[in-house]
């Protein structure tokens, strides 16, 4: 039986330190029924834009800054994210 080497473990948004920047997929962010924006902290984060991971974020002490220019043409429903009910780490979003 093999164990996953740490070098192959994906970095998550929740695991970022305050001040760290990175890129994740646009659908990591969602709006609840009150239109409040959240990020699913369990999503992977990359150091550079890669594939569909183009949403630029910065971790703060209390949540995540999302840079609006990186959202592109992605749109968001209200309270209908497939991740909304199963999010283990829900971090508040500040748009910048």
Image (cartoon, rainbow, N blue to C red):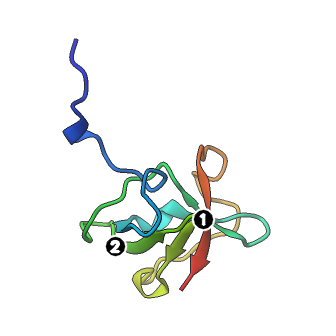
Residue 14 lies left or right of residue 56; in this view the side is: right
Identified at 27% across, 65% down, the residue is 47
Residue 77 lies left or right of residue 41; in this view the side is: right
x and y percent of residue 69 in the render? 43, 88
Quadrant of res 80: bottom right
x and y percent of residue 18 in the render? 47, 64
x and y percent of residue 25 in the render? 40, 64
Compute the Cα span from label 1 to label 2. Answer: 16 Å
Figure check: 75 above or below 41? below
Identified at 34% across, 73% down, the residue is 54
Circle 1: element type:
strand
Figure check: 88 above or below 45? above
Quadrant of res 93: bottom right
Q: Residues within 10 Å of mark 2 (few under 14, many from 20)?
A: some
Q: Earlier in the sequence, mark 1 or mark 2?
A: 1
Figure check: 28 above or below 57? above
Circle 2: element type:
loop
x and y percent of residue 48 in the render? 24, 70
Name the disc covering residue 54, or none.
2
Name the disc covering residue 8, or none.
none
Residue 75 lies left or right of residue 71; in this view the side is: right
User: Viewer-proximal residue, 72 or 66?
Assistant: 66
Determine the residue located farthest toward the top in the rendered image: 1
User: Viewer-proximal residue, 20 or 29?
Assistant: 20
How many numbered circles are shown?
2
Identified at 40% across, 82% down, the residue is 70
For mark 1, what is the residue? 30
Identified at 25% across, 22% down, the residue is 3
Figure check: 91 above or below 54? above
């Amino acid at each position: 039986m093999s164990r996953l080497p740490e070098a192959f473990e994906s970095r998550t948004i929740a695991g970022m330190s305050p001040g760290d920047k990175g890129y994740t997929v646009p659908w990591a962010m969602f709006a609840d029924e009150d239109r409040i924006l959240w990020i699913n902290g369990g999503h992977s984060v990359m150091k550079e834009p890669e594939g569909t991971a183009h949403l630029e974020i910065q971790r703060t002490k209390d949540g995540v800054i999302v840079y609006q220019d990186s959202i592109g043409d992605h749109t968001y429903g209200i309270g209908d994210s497939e991740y909304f009910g199963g999010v283990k780490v829900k971090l508040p979003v500040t748009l910048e």
